[in-house]
Amino acid sequence: MGYEIIDPKDFLENGAFFEKKFREKIEHFEWQQYDGQRVLVRGCGSALTPPWAFMIFVGKLAKYASAIFYGSEHDRIPVYNRRIDG
């Protein structure tokens, strides 16, 4: 089963996380594209993702994604799994 991937480096400003710029990018991002998808937030990139940034990713994705993972395609940690009661 595949994953959609979010790479935190796509949210950097001049190679670093600056909270104000990060939040602006987050607010203008199209989170709906992940509706019902399994999403991996890449965690092994060249830039370290601060915990507050990761928490914002998860908070935004939880509204749409069916599952959220952190790490790499080969080594991922489950973070969130939407329970669907049938």
Image: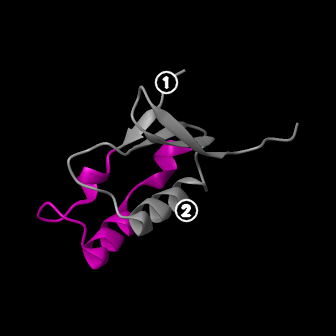
Q: Which residue is mark 2?
A: 59
Residue type of the residue flagged with mark 1: Gly
Query: Is residue 47 depicted above or below 84 in this figure?
Result: below
Q: From the top left corner, tell me how far across and down residue 15 is, in percent.
A: 14, 60
Q: Quadrant of residue 78?
A: top right
Identify which residue is drawn at 32% across, 46% down.
Answer: 7
| Quarter the N terminus occupies | top right
Residue placed furthest toward the top? 1
Label 2 is placed on what type of residue?
Answer: Gly
Q: Nearer the viewer, residue 72 or 35?
A: 72
The image quarter containing residue 20 is: bottom left
Is residue 20 located in the magenta-colored stretch of the structure? yes
Image quarter of residue 59: bottom right
Q: Give the label on residue 65, or none.
A: none
Which residue, given by chain and number where applicable, does mark 1 sit on? Answer: 2
Judge whether residue 46 is colored magenta.
Answer: no
Closer to the camera in the image, 74 or 9: 74
- Give the residue displayed 42% in from the left and 64% down from the top: 51
Q: Report helix, strand or loop for mark 2.
A: helix
In the image, 13 versus 26, the foreground residue is 13
Identify the mark nearer the N-term, 1 or 2.
Answer: 1
Query: Which residue is located at x 46 percent, y 58 percent?
Result: 57
Mark 1 → mark 2, Cα distance in angstroms:
21 Å
User: Which quarter of the rendered picture does the C terminus lie within?
Assistant: top right
85 lies above or below 17: above
* Segment tinted magenta in the rendering: 7-35
* Mark 2 closeness class: few <14, some 14–19, many ≥20 residues within 10 Å: few
